[in-house]
Amino acid sequence: MEQLQRIGVSLEGTLLEQFDKLIERQGYTNRSEAIRDLIRNRLTDEKLADPNTRAIAAVLMVYDHHQSRLAQRLIELQHDHHLHTISSMHVHIDHHNCLEVVLLQGSVGEITRLGDRIVSLKGVKLGKVNLVATD
Amino acid sequence: MEQLQRIGVSLEGTLLEQFDKLIERQGYTNRSEAIRDLIRNRLTDEKLADPNTRAIAAVLMVYDHHQSRLAQRLIELQHDHHLHTISSMHVHIDHHNCLEVVLLQGSVGEITRLGDRIVSLKGVKLGKVNLVATD
Amino acid sequence: MEQLQRIGVSLEGTLLEQFDKLIERQGYTNRSEAIRDLIRNRLTDEKLADPNTRAIAAVLMVYDHHQSRLAQRLIELQHDHHLHTISSMHVHIDHHNCLEVVLLQGSVGEITRLGDRIVSLKGVKLGKVNLVATD
Amino acid sequence: MEQLQRIGVSLEGTLLEQFDKLIERQGYTNRSEAIRDLIRNRLTDEKLADPNTRAIAAVLMVYDHHQSRLAQRLIELQHDHHLHTISSMHVHIDHHNCLEVVLLQGSVGEITRLGDRIVSLKGVKLGKVNLVATD
């Protein structure tokens, strides 16, 4: 674990009070942890704006598993890009629909393109590509 | 001006260093100001999730001013909802296109619906509704 | 498979050309599929604005697995809410960091709150809660 | 006005029905207009990912006008970058707070940086930078 440093932050009393209520609702047990999370999220957004940043993409998609050939195409696409695919998880939603999460690793540029190709496959009804910077 | 309170925040040295670099690039002159802004943005996002929160919407739209009747419909729509419309600003982009910003005031629910109606008018090419909580 | 209906859409030639280029880059093989995806995403955004909509949340988080007790707290939290947790997937990023994806099922309101509690746990460095409507 | 082209789109009956209800609520008078808007928004998001795209930024900010020097700094900053600033609009929210919308024109990279500097000024309580591609 890296050593923690301590800084002082001054802010208006009412702002502090509202923040304390919010983080209590969210389940934080201390204020420093909540502020560190705000800072980390701001930094990761900044990094993700650069296509060369190393990142992991979680591709979420809902698809109809009766759609012939889609499951096959998904597997082929993951294998064609085996350097980028880490793993995937599949859940059954109802008689027709599955949700699949595919994790991709690479540069922001590469995995965004690959994620776009996955959610564009015929039969994918809903798709989202979510990135987390790992640099 | 409300009285400022001072709190201590502990965080990892490398996180602090990255944050200091980011806020210097953004032009902040002190760290407390940058952290206050992160906190305020988090709180306003939380408030905007409640349709009853009082807010201001900035409706941005690009439209073709040759489109007959659109300018007229826009003005009528603003007048029908005069309790909600604050003001608007218009700029010329090129021979065909104008950008207009309309500010609406009311509950999140009301101004989102009205903003949606504005950006759905025939002739509006691009539209976005952006909210800021004022509570 | 549900029966498809056919509708006509009129749009400017240059808009159509730009759209065709975009969807080719994304890997779509036909235009109807691409337009259906735009429509479905718009509808799901609309549904997610209602806290009562049934949905699945994919909670992404990066955490330090050396952080004592976090793995334990994560498992406890998932079990306390066993009605909401579907499954989770874990990957190793580097010596310190893990990425975990936890899938939660329930109403938008419930799973947003539970997702917030998970990403607020001490030791979680980065967290995002992503929703997909399943209604 | 550019000539319209007509294309056929096939989609599931229930998807079409839900879409028709949504766009009626939003106030669209015809389906083609609603689909054109979805396509334009998708294209503009794509363009905004490139820092060289020409765009307009609407910078929204809430600030306390009692804050000495902020109004002055805002005007100076706009003048230092007069090539980028188009115009601004100011509204009174309550005794303490003003909302200001500043429109900036330039490349996505330039106006994002300038927008960040504006919302980072001491005294700005809430700030958002919203882009619209104009290419």
Image (cartoon, coloured by chain):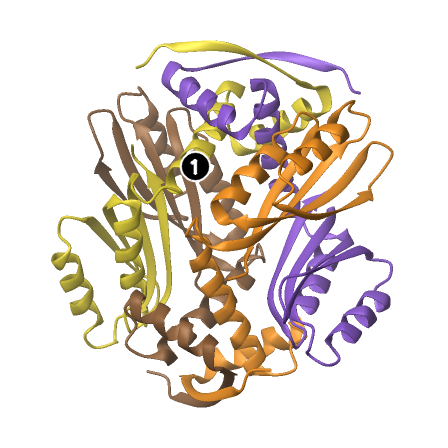
Chain colours: A brown, B orange, C yellow, D purple
* For residue C35, above or below residue B9: above
Camera sees residue C121: yes
Q: Amino acid at mark 1?
A: Glu
Residue at position x 27%, y 26% in the image: A65
**Left or right: A70 with respect to B46?**
left
Q: Estimate the x, y position of residue A101 in percent, counting from the top left.
A: 32, 43
Residue at position x 46%, y 82% in the image: A13
Q: Nearer the viewer, residue B104 or D17?
A: B104
Residue at position x 54%, y 61% in the image: B134
Q: Nearer the viewer, residue B23 or B55?
A: B55
Which quarter of the figure has residue A77? top left
Q: Nearer the viewer, residue B43 or C37?
A: B43
Q: Secondary structure at mark 1?
A: helix
Q: Estimate the x, y position of residue B43 in percent, counting from the top left.
A: 45, 65
Residue at position x 18%, y 68% in the image: C73
Camera sees residue D135: no
> What residue did someone put label 1 on?
C46
